Amino acid sequence: MIINPYESAKKKIDIAAELINLDPNTLEYLKKTERALIVSVPIMMDDGSLEIFEGYRVHHSTLRGPGKGGVRFSPFVTLDEMKALALLMTFKTALLGLPLGGSKGGIRVDTKKLSNRELEVLTRRYTMEIINMIGPDRDVAAPDMYTDSTTMAWMMDTYSMQKGRTISGVVTGKPIDIGGSIGRAEAPGTGMIYLLRHLCQKLNYNLNKMSVVIQGFGKVGSVVAKQLCNNSCNVIAISEEEGGIYSPTGLDIDMLIKWKQQGNLLKDYESKNSSPITNAELLSTECDVLIPAAVENQIYSGNADKIDCKIILEGANSPTTSQADEILEEKEIVVVPDIIANSGGVCVSYFEYIQDMQSYFWKLDRVNKEMKTILLYSFEEIFKFSKKTDSSLRTAAYAISANRLAKAHELRGLFP
Ligand code: GLU
């Protein structure tokens, strides 16, 4: 079954809107995309041939401030995926109370097939093509799947060259030497650990004794796995696109990180106590905490009934469909939704943005302390609202954001 990501994202707003009796006009307004740009990105390949890639930048909403959202390079990027992820960003920034909107961009490309030079020219040409959509007071980009601090450095440099001066606030997630924030790279994972520890305290679970399964070993999955091991949790399974590895007694994450750095696949790792596992098997592995930290729609109506855990902590954006949500609710699995679970990333992006504006850079303990305050405060709001309205954490989170966006819409009024 093919799930349209934009339709799926809008469904989540519909459910929340019903809970809070949102005015139908406002609901329509909140579901629409403010603007979307489709660009062709031509580049000269190393072999002298010309390749043209399709790229996008989408502003879902700038109601509460400049757009904010990542740039994704993946073979599966489509306009509807960008619209869905931009909408998610609007609800994520509103939920944290940040003075930002929501946006997303990307290029449909398999970066594994590009040389470093090809990747750099692709990034720079893409930045040039979307230059009128971005800027510190318009829309601030950041890393997402298959983009990183190097991508952000190229984007910042291209933008600055065009404007004739260094403008570091156009992107976040930059290298620290050129205006990046300390703690930003690890922020989604760090935030997830703060939230998980807090939730476990509330539910009277002992985090240190919990078994954890993680789908994804990228920027989010690997950081969270390492931090969980530091907390003496048992990470019993972890995977990447090609498959994963399972050990009932717990995996040695430091060894696996080294193994990956040597260019190997997780499933090829051999040890006495571990065995390879497919992504489908991984998702139905019995555990205390399941962390989907890969791509969208991994938990859907076809596999939700096989999920065997107490808590789902969504590291990826939109890993669970609305139909799956209903099944998980019946099974009484607590789902910590993406818009709060992985929001440490955009939270520290916001800190980076204000540090750039002020040319004053914080120390790591300030970054983490302020992130923790914002995340736990938002989580408490969601938790209380979900109890009060007898709704899931996801519906409560969307409802809180929808209320904030509706208020901003009402206060600003409609132009002209
Ligand atoms: N791509 C990340 C996300 O989906 C970070 C966005 C940002 O920092 O602006 O939340």
Image: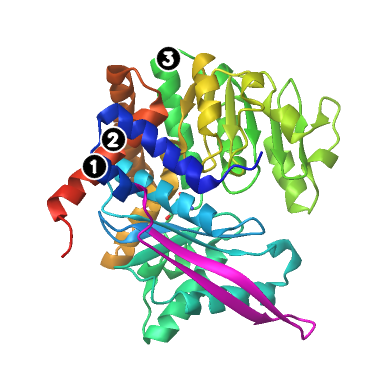
- N-term mark: 3 or 2: 3
Residue under numbered circle 1: 404
Viewer-nearest of labels 3 and 2? Answer: 2
Boundaries of the magenta span: 31-59
Measuring from the top left, give residue 60's x and y in whole percent. 38, 56
Going from the N terminus, do you reach mark 1 or mark 3 first? 3
Left or right: 311 as drawn, with respect to 20: right
Which label sits on residue 203?
Answer: 3
Residue type for callout 1: Arg
Counting from the top left corner in percent of width and height, residue 25 is at 25, 45
Q: Are marks 1 and 2 in contact (CB under 8 Å)?
A: yes
Colouring convention used in this rendered image of the protein: rainbow
Split into 4 quadrants, where in the image is the N terminus? top right
> What residue do we see at 38% from left, 43% from top?
368
What kind of residue is marked 2? Answer: Ile
Residue 171 occupies quadrant: bottom left
Q: CA distance from mark 3 to mark 2?
A: 22 Å
Q: Quadrant of residue 64?
A: bottom left
| Left/right of residue 272 with respect to residue 229 in the rendered view | right
In the rendered image, which residue does mark 2 sit on?
400
Compute the Cα span from label 1 to label 2: 6 Å
Query: Residue visible at 78% across and 54% down?
Result: 263
Secondary structure at badge 3 equals helix
> Can residue 68 be seen in this snapshot?
yes
